[in-house]
Amino acid sequence: MSQYKMWIDGKWVEAESGKTYPVYNPATGEVIAQLPLGGVTDVDKAVVAARKAFPIWSKKSQADRSAIAMKIAAMLRDNARELGKLDTLDHGSPAQRAAFLPTASSLNFEWAAYNCRSLMGHTIPSTSEDLIYLQREPIGVIAIITPWNVPLMMVVEKLAPALTLGNTCIIKPPSIDSLEALKFAEMLDTLGLPPGTVNVITGPGGIVGDALSSHRGIDMVAFTGSCEVGKAIMSSASQTVKRLQLELGGKNPVIVLDDADVDAAAAEAVGNQYKNCGQICASPGRFYIHEKVYDQFLEKMLAGAKKFVWGDPNDMKTQMGPLVSAEHRDRVEGYIKSGIEQGAKLLLGGKRPTTAPLNKGYYLPPTIFTGVTQQMKIAREEIFGPVACIMEKFNSDEQVLAWANDNTYGLAAYVWTGDTARGMRFANNLQAGTVRINAGHGGGPELPWGGYKESGLGKEGSLYGLYEYSNLKRVQVDLAVKK
Ligand code: NAD
């Protein structure tokens, strides 16, 4: 079993309290590592270090910072297999997919490196007697608080723009899934960054995360996680009016219209629903299927879900591993129970394995409910598990649009149709930050991502995402000759 340390002020340290906590392999339930149980004093130390590093790091030229970002991108690619193995061990990601994620994450640093170098200011026409220009500046010390669902990528998506633009950062990875962030920090440690430019503190969100969100020395919180914690962070951060970037939950509608390519929609539905055990913010939350294609879609989706290979994540054939923790599986099972109690029909799965070896891990099979209605808890709340909710059939565009928008979340939506104009009319009316027509979830650093309604604030990715991590300053010069 490995004993890890935190990275504060360029040094590898224990928690001030000297305490540690265990983390588990979700595939076996075994303890795999002990991590420092960070606390408020550790946060104070990291804030002092990051503030000390800020004038040094932010005053480097953009070309120098971009060159370092390119080195980080290369490191992520070169170490993709090792990072992927940790992802399988710590998170339960299927080995067949694990190395892909660090490689994909490297693109965030590459993209930030190029695009920060070409972030231009503006001049604003006024009179011949003055000059007004706008410039972008780093914000200061940014707390990066991330969830466990894609542990490394969630850190990198925020760190790449924040660091490359000249901010210094304190990363608070998810307490149950911190190993990849710590391994990544070991790589950063070889780059000779000014001590304190990047810091990593492990420990419970309610203590470390809250101390960061309320700390006077933190200028911005970049957070990905649940809506509940996002609201708590908004409240703590309000005391010092911190800049916030919040990527929160979703309950994403998938609408299959009567003219859709049903085979393609069902195939994508299976992959999108069960990939990463449904633990993706963009996973389908509600399937709305037109009555004319309902039976055909259901038959195909059921067949696809039955074939989806789940089990030991180390087996290269496995497409879906365990859920991330015993607590999270209990939570998902609570939703399954509630669906049954409220009258939805459990068509597939729903029960944890009871025989060895899978009974030791936190597994649930691909699960499908049908007959889900708008008011059921499983239709309203984010399950974040391998549970597909097939809603009542619909027969009009107006009806399904109203149902799709009837939710507090507004992260993503998917429309399947043979008529692109019809799909675009849906896109115009769906309350979601991303609408994909005839496609499942996919991304890249050049694409903006972020929710409407309670799904978040601000954007990640694209130039809009870069702007989140910089302040915009107006400089106004009076050129008139003064006597
Ligand atoms: P979570 O909100 O429980 O935890 C996220 C992070 O916040 C963790 O590091 C946690 O330790 C920390 N935290 C907990 N309490 C805190 C507090 N009081 N103050 C500050 N920090 C605190 O989320 P999770 O269970 O790790 O992840 C799942 C959630 O993340 C889902 O809701 C999912 O939709 C969301 N998510 C959203 C996106 C997106 O891009 N919109 C992407 C991935 C995940």
Image (spheres, grey):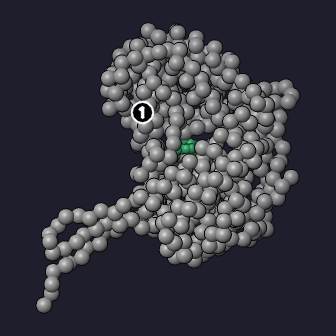
Residue 5 appears in view = yes
Name above or below for residue 405 compared with residue 167.
Answer: above
Q: Which residue is drawn at 64% across and 53% down?
A: 74
Name above or below for residue 306 compared with residue 332.
Answer: above
Q: Nearer the viewer, residue 469 or 288?
A: 469
Residue designated by label 1: 435
Q: Nearer the viewer, residue 446 or 359?
A: 446
The amino acid at mark 1 is: Val
State the image coordinates of residue 196 (x, y, percent, origin top left): 62, 71
Q: Nearer the viewer, residue 217 or 391?
A: 217
Q: Which residue is drawn at 52% across and 9% down?
A: 295
Residue 409 appears in view = no
For the C terminus, the image quarter is: bottom left
Q: Which residue is drawn at 44% across and 16% down?
A: 260
State the image coordinates of residue 351 (x, y, percent, origin top left): 72, 24
- 397 left or right of 357? left
- 372 left or right of 45? left
Name above or below for residue 354 compared with residue 19.
Answer: above
Q: Which residue is drawn at 43% across and 37% down?
A: 434
Asked which quadrant contains residue 335, the reply is top right
Mark 1 C-beta to ligand 1 under 8 Å:
no
